[in-house]
Every structure is written in C-alpha cells, then in structure tokens.
Image (cartoon, coloured by chain):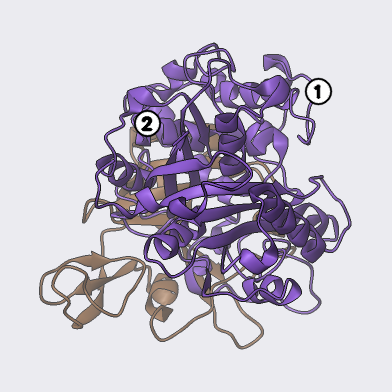
Chain colours: A purple, B brown
Amino acid sequence: MPDDHIERHCVISGVGQSDVGRRLGRDPRELTLDACLAAAEDAGLTTAQIDGLSTYPGAAVPIPGFSGAGAYEVIDALRLHVDWYDSGLETSGQLGSVMKACLAVGAGMATHVLCFRSVWEGSAQGTGGRASLAGGGGGRAGPPPRASGPNQWTLPYGSASAANWIALYAQAHMHRYGTTPEQLAQIALNGRRNAARNPKAIYRQPMSMEDYFASRIISTPLRLFDCDVPCDGATAVVVSRRERAADLRHPPVRVAAMGAALHDRPSWDQLSDLTRLVGADAAAQMWSRTDLTPADVDLAELYDGFSILTMLWLEALGLCPVGESGRFVEDGSRIALDGELPLNTHGGQLSAGRLHGYGFLHEAVVQLRGDGGERQVAGNPSVAAVAAGGGNTCGCMLLTAGD
Amino acid sequence: MSDVGPRRMLPELTDRTRFYWEGGRSGQLLILCCQRCGYYLHPPAPLCPVDHSTELAPERVSGRGRVASFTVDHHRWLPAPEPPYVIALVELAEQEALRLTTNIVGCPPEDVHIGMEVAVTFEHQADSEGRGDVWLPMFRPIGGAAGA
C-alpha cells in the first residue's frame, strides 16, 4: 500500500450482530445496542475504550424502519466518551460511515470507532408503512399529500420504489449487453445456496430456477426474488488504529483501500449512463489507493438490494469486464462458494436480510478470519472486496487478512 | 375532471416548478433553459451547471424523444396508477441525456421498447383542494415503429 494513504493506520478489530429476523418485534434500540456491545466484546474492548462513533443514516430519517437508532442514542445509552462522532445519510453509501471512521482514526481524532447500521424495516412494514416506498408511504385520512422535492418527479407516475428505479438500469443493461433474466437469476440462486449454510439467514430453503421464475414480477425485469428482504437487525464493526490493535482479541483485518468518489449526478434517474453504477467512480478511486488489483480478490461481498446491483458492482470493480457480468455469473459456478470468485457468501440481502450494506462488511471480516463455519471459503482467503449502495449512493472497501 | 376512483399523487406546485406542471394547459412541454448558453436543465435548479448563469427561463421543447429505458410496474405502490403501467425514462430530442421520468401511454405495455420514438401528451389532473391543477407530461408512441 502506498505509504501516504490513511488506510494504513486502520483495521477492523471487531464485528457484532444482533438477532436478525423478518419481524422480531423488539425495540430497535435494543437490537442496535446488542450489535454494538457484541462488536466491542469481539474486539476485546470495553465501552470505556471506545472513543469514537459513526453510523448511517442517523436518527430522524422519515422512512419507516430505516434507522433503528441515532448516534446520540447509542452514545448516551453506553455513556460513551467520544473524541469524534458522526452520522448522516448523504455519504458514499452505507459504507461511507465506516470510511469516515477510518478517516477519523487515520487523522488521530479517535482510536477505536464503533460503527453501526440498524434497521427494523420488517416490523415497520408489518404495521402498514412501506420503507421501500419513496416518501414513506403509510395510510392517512384526508386528501393525499402532494409530492415535493425529488419525489415530485417520480411519484405522479407511480415510480415510487427503488425497485422501479433500479429496474430501469436492469432493462438498459439487458438491452445494451444482452444480459438475460436467467443470468440475473443466478445472483438470487447463489445467495440462497449460501444462505442455507448461514444459520442467521432469513430464507434458507432451496430455490430453483423454476422457483425464481414462478415469483411474481414487481417491475420488469425484476421479480420478487430480485428484491432484498426487509428485516429487523443491527450490525456493528469497530475501526481501530492499527498500532493500537495488536493486542486485541482477534488478528485485525486491515483496510487496504477505500473508495468514496461520486463523479456522476447524485440522482437515480439522471445518471449519464444507466448501465454504469456511480460506484464505478468509487471503485476506480479504491484501486488507485492500493497495489492490489482485481485479480487479487479472493471473495466479493457486493450489495444486492436488487440482483442487478451485484452485477453492476462486479463490472464497476473490474471483477469482470464492463457488460460481461451476465456471462460471468452464468450457470453460477464461478460465483459459488467453491468457485473462482465466491460471492455474497452469507446469502446477501436477498436471502440473509436487508441489513443494508453492513451485512456484507460483517461477512467479509468473518471470512477473512476463517470463521465462516459451514460457509467458509476454502484456501484461507486473504483479500475481500466489499461494496454497498446503488442509485446515487455507492462506496467500496478492500479488506485484507493478516498484518 | 371526468375520471373517478383513485387519484395519482400530484406534485406540489412551487415558484420554481409550476411552469413544468402547468405547461400542458396550452399543450406545451417546457424545460428550464439557460438564456446565455442554451443548456436545458432538468430537474429545475437555481443556476446553469455549465456556465453558472442564473438567467434561466422555461423554453418550449419539441416534445419528441426516445425511450432510454422503461419498466412495466406490476406492484401497487400507490392508489394510482393502476398496474400494470409503464414507467419510462424519455430522453428528449433537444439534448443528450436530457431525461424525464414519465409514463408511456397509448400502446400496450408489451409494445414499449428502448429506442422507441415518442411524443408528449398531457394528462390533466383537476384539483378541488386549492392546490392547483396539474398537467402531467406523458409520452405516446409515434410513427410506424410503435406497433399496434
């Protein structure tokens, strides 16, 4: 790694996760604190040693179930004494919060930063709201409210969900590159195969190609099984200063490089190229900050809020040529646990639940530590690519095992 | 207003956006345009991203374009429109990547394809609550390529 890059100071020293379920019916703050305490414990740190905090998206986001706890709630509940903290939605995807923690650690503002992402969309949607719906949805009496801000350009046309917006990318990719629904299905089938080996995954029963095509169409070409599953759960990681992590509980996982760039318009429908993820800018930045190359990647944990996003991330990260992701995943063997590029080894959000970005980071650390159990990738994988986000918000990180 | 039943969610009319939603009253698709360099902006913004001029004004465009991408929605998210319906990104003829999210009407959903030539049409949404009528720009196929 180039010596002047801040990542050389940063490791992931701990990971933690709460119970995960379709609808747990628990206070989301409890789930959040479960994950945070588990991550600190995993790192071998006391809460008194945690001196920084970072989260996505923070409190007061008016989408049902989208945020289980804000930064202040966790700081107060754990009586943390933080030297640095941050939260926010306008950042480079869900991983933006972890990258900001790395910047704080690298800059010497904090030594051990607790990062978390907490959702309760499963329960929230079960009570009438729909988290995936722009504007929040939910029933109200009286005349319907009018759409304002960015929503005014889409809601009048029934373009209400990210499923609609992302479907437009999928259709464009199929048109330009000949990508097929059968190829798209491989992302869902691969996730389900891996979820069968993950005790915490939400959907673990086998899924066949026939099952996939029997699932109802949401917004062509996307079917229900192309859409991730809303759930309740929280995930946390601890970003630590590398020099201070040597005596912690687990061998640290290093942050080799990170990418946060956004060179396109921050928009879902005004992108310069509908088949190119804005994450391509973040990926290019990430590769510019390391001597590693896509050929060095042993496994990939790539966001699958919708199946097509994983394919677009494969291309954005250079893990396959642009336009070739369909052929890359065809027949599923290349991306299987025993394939050349094991992908979404915990089942992804499609089968393991929409933990919203952090699930991929958690899984990458588990795999690099060799703690994957039944789903552990063989051969001591040492380089993992992690990417999260889609639409106008994307970020990616490269993690390596060992020091 | 002749239609009954569920209503589409309508846009809030503001000083910055009213021209776009009311242009259909006179059958005009209006897009904000930089008066110095001629660049079209959508959605409307306070200044031109090319030359940072604030001399912006709505200009009538041809209303012609092509389908850059589309999706047929089958899930009911809102009371209206009634699924299945076609959501499209239409790229206007005037400028590369000048796109609107819209609906394709006037043909069966299965006839819509990327690259299809389309022209604007307006759906009038009357308002009885004092928030202003709206004319939603939508697009229909033109020419022989549209299919039956």
Q: Picture coordinates of residue A18 (x, y %)?
A: 77, 50
Quadrant for residue A40, please give it.
Answer: bottom right
SS class of the residue under badge 2? helix
Q: Quadrant of the N terminus of chain A?
A: top left
Q: Picture coordinates of residue B55 (x, y %)?
A: 18, 83
Residue ID at (66%, 27%): A372
Residue ID at (39%, 57%): B100
Q: Residues within 10 Å of mark 1 (few under 14, many from 20)?
A: few
Q: How many marks can you see?
A: 2
What amino acid is found at the position of numbered circle 1 in the picture? Answer: Gln
Residue ID for mark 1:
A205
Q: Are marks 1 and 2 on the same chain?
A: yes
Residue ID at (31%, 32%): A292
Q: Quadrant of the C terminus of chain A?
A: top left
Quadrant for residue A343, please give it.
Answer: top right
SS class of the residue under badge 1? loop
Quadrant for residue A376, please give it.
Answer: top right
What amino acid is found at the position of numbered circle 2 in the picture? Answer: Glu
Query: Between residues A97 and B58, which one lies in front from this camera angle?
Result: A97
Residue ID for mark 2:
A315
Q: Residues within 10 Å of mark 2 (few under 14, many from 20)?
A: many
Q: Picture coordinates of residue A249 (x, y %)?
A: 64, 44
Inter-mark Cα distance, 1 to 2:
29 Å
Query: Between residues A161 and A92, which one lies in front from this camera angle?
Result: A92
Residue ID at (24%, 44%): A2
The furthest residue to the right: A25
